[in-house]
Image (spheres, rainbow, N blue to C red):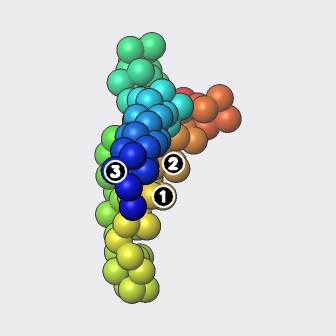
Amino acid sequence: MSATHCNMVNEETVSQIEAMRRQECSAYACRDYFSERSRKTQKYRQAAPVTPTSRSKMIDWCYQIVDHCGFDRESVIIAMNYLDRFLMTKSGAPALN
């Protein structure tokens, strides 16, 4: 490979990584729905079906399942990421109230 071609490939790679980092900070960002909820009103904290404690119990339970079934533990991380993202949507918000 020529030096010019390598530079073009490196510039393209850097450009792609920069684009992915921008997406992580904007489109893929996951807000802290527990603190947002607690700022709105205290009554939701006591009545909310999904609390920090219940979320922690869900994570522990998921790890028990993947360990029992021999699945990759990263599956739990991905699943909780999906749950967090869902709870930040309009469709998922009722689960916090």
Q: Residue at x 37, y 66 (%)?
A: 74
Residue 50 percent across, percent down from the top left: 46, 42
Residue type beneath disc 1: Ala
Between 92 and 97, the one lying in front of the other is 92
- The disc at residue 23 is none
Disc 3 on helix, strand or loop? helix
Taking the image as drawn, is residue 29 in sight? Answer: no
Disc 2 on helix, strand or loop? helix
Q: Residue at x 44, y 37 (%)?
A: 15
Foreground mark, 2 or 3, reads 3
Between 48 and 91, the one lying in front of the other is 91
Q: Which residue is the site of mark 2?
A: 83
Q: Is residue 66 left or right of residue 97?
A: left
Taking the image as drawn, is residue 76 in sight? Answer: yes
- The disc at residue 3 is 3
Q: Check whether the beta carbons of the residues at disc 2 and disc 1 lie within 8 A of each other.
A: yes
Residue type beneath disc 3: Ala
Q: Check whether the beta carbons of the residues at disc 3 and disc 1 lie within 8 A of each other.
A: no
Residue 93 percent across, percent down from the top left: 58, 31
Find the distance from the CA under tag 2 to the CA under tag 1. 6 Å
Q: Residue lying furthest right in this view?
A: 91
Disc with the residue nearer the chain's start (2 vs 3): 3
Q: Check whether the beta carbons of the residues at disc 2 and disc 3 lie within 8 A of each other.
A: no
Q: Which residue is the site of mark 1?
A: 79
Give neighbour class at mark 1: few <14, some 14-19, many 20+ (Cα, 10 Å).
few
Residue 40 percent across, percent down from the top left: 45, 13
Residue type beneath disc 2: Leu
